[in-house]
Image (tube, rainbow, N blue to C red):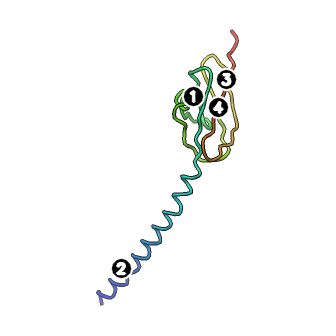
Amino acid sequence: MSRSLFRVGARWLGVIGLASASIAGCTSAPREARLAYLKVVAEPVNVTVYLEDRFIGSAHLLQKQPKPLPTGVKYLTFKAPGYFPHDLRVSLPQGETTVKIKLRPIPP
């Protein structure tokens, strides 16, 4: 009796293993294909970049190494000491998007 129960259990495990492997294969490919890469070229050189109020890096670094992000509409904020902050709504499609920005200095 235990022998036939074991065989039934083994068959179910095999089917479950195949199903989960094919599901994982289907979901991981589109996720990678839908990545956007944000490249930032900014003045002054010490601009920091925030994505929806969360720091994601300095513009200097994001110019050399674009940040991988999910595609879609994003809200960016650019800040630097002595300059007015600048908010920007940007749509990030698949692939690389370059944002060029020059902050305005705060008058003395």
Q: Which residue is mark 1?
A: 59
Mark 2 / mark 4, whichever is N-terminal: 2
x and y percentages locating residue 42 in the rendered image: 62, 25
Is label 3 or label 4 in front? Answer: 3
x and y percentages locating residue 32 in the rendered image: 54, 52
Structural distance between the alpha carbons of marks 2 and 4? 55 Å
Q: Quadrant of residue 2?
A: bottom left
SS type, badge 2: helix
Q: Quadrant of residue 83?
A: top right
Mark 1 / mark 2, whichever is N-terminal: 2
Query: What's the residue type where badge 1 is placed?
Result: Ala
Query: What's the residue type where badge 2 is placed?
Result: Ala
Tell me whether the residue at label 4 lies in contact with that at label 1, contact meaning CB atoms closer than 8 angstroms.
no
Q: Which residue is mark 4?
A: 77
Per the rendering, the mark at residue 10 is 2
Tell me whether the residue at label 3 lies in contact with that at label 2, contact meaning CB atoms closer than 8 angstroms.
no
SS type, badge 4: strand
Is label 1 or label 2 in front? Answer: 1
> Quick one: quadrant of the C terminus?
top right
Q: Report crowding for label 2: few under 14, some 14 to 19, many 20 or more residues within 10 A (C-alpha).
A: few
Q: Is residue 38 left or right of residue 10?
A: right
Mark 3 / mark 1, whichever is N-terminal: 1
Mark 3 / mark 2, whichever is N-terminal: 2
